[in-house]
Amino acid sequence: MEINFDKEGLVPAIIQDVNSKKVLMLGYMNKESYDKTLKTKKVTFYSRSRKQLWTKGEESGNFLQLVSIKSDCDQDTLLVEVIPAGPVCHKGTDTCWADVNEEPLMFLKHLQGVLNQRFTEMPEGSYTTELFQSGVNRMAQKVGEEAVETVIEATNGEDNRLLYEGSDLIYHLMVLLTSKGYGIEDLAKELQDRHKDSWKKH
C-alpha cells in the first residue's frame, strides 16, 4: 500500500472500532510504527511530543488489536480498523470524544460472523451446530415456531417477552439464512433496494 508521509515522515491515522464503527481516536504513524503495527497486530503510533514510538495500551493494557489498515484517495491519511481491549482515551472514556463505544445494531454483524464460523467448523456441543445438522426443514420449522410465539407476546403478552421471543425469531432466521448461503447483510440489502425508485415488487 502506498502512503504519502508528510515532510516530517508522519501520516495521520484515524482509529475506528471495526464492530461499532465508532471513531475512537486520532494518532500519527511514521514508517517504523506502521511496520511494527503490521508485524505485531497491535496499533503503534509515533509520539510527536516524546519523539518515539508507543504502542497503545502498553501501560494500561487496553491494546488496539489490528483488523485492517486502509489509505484514503490521496494516500495521506490512514483508516485503521481495530478491536479495542478497553477504553481508548487516557481519561478513561471509550473514545477521545467521550462517546460511548456501543452500537447494539452492529452486534447483528458480529453474530453473523459467529454463525458463519459455526457453519464452517460445526463445533460439538453447540446449539447452532445442532440446528445446522438438523436440516432445512427443522430450521424453517423453528423460525415458524418463534414467529408464532412473537405474535402471541405482541398481542397478549408483555413487552419484555416480546423482545425475548423476537430475539429468538431473528436468531433462528439468521441460522436458516446462513444454511442457505445468505446472511443478515442480504436482508439489509433487500430492504435497501426497496427504497430505490427502480425497485419493483417480485
Image: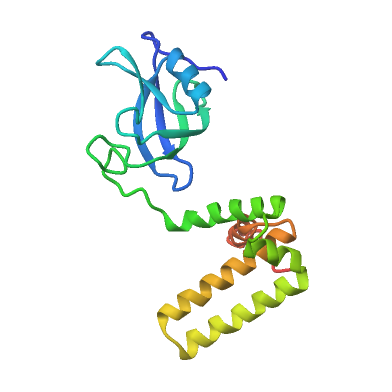
Q: Which residue lies furthest to the top in this view?
A: 7
Q: In this view, does 20 lie above or below 80?
A: below
Q: Residue furthest front?
A: 125
Q: In this view, does 185 lie to the left or right of 79?
A: right
- Visual colour scheme: rainbow
Instruction: Estimate the x, y position of residue 188 in percent, counting from the top left.
Output: 59, 58
Q: In this view, does 199 lie above or below 72?
A: below
Q: Which of 8 and 144 is in front in this view?
A: 144
Residue at coordinates 44% horizontally, 24% vertically from top-left?
A: 77
Location of residue 115 (image quadrant): bottom right
Tag count in the figure?
0
Instruction: Estimate the x, y position of residue 199 in percent, counting from the top left.
Output: 66, 61
Q: Which residue lies furthest to the left in this view?
A: 91
Instruction: Estimate the x, y position of residue 140 in percent, counting from the top left.
Output: 71, 73
Q: In this view, does 135 lie to the left or right of 164?
A: right
Q: Which of 131 and 100 is in front in this view?
A: 131
Q: Nearer the viewer, residue 30 or 78?
A: 30
Instruction: Estimate the x, y position of residue 106 in percent, counting from the top left.
Output: 48, 54
Position of the N terminus by quadrant: top right
Q: In this view, does 61 lie to the left or right of 75?
A: left
Q: Which of 71 and 162 is in front in this view?
A: 162
Q: Is residue 5 above or below residue 18?
A: above
Residue at coordinates 66% horizontally, 79% vertically from top-left?
A: 144
Location of residue 129 (image quadrant): bottom right
Position of the C terminus by quadrant: bottom right
Q: In this view, does 154 lie above or below 191?
A: below
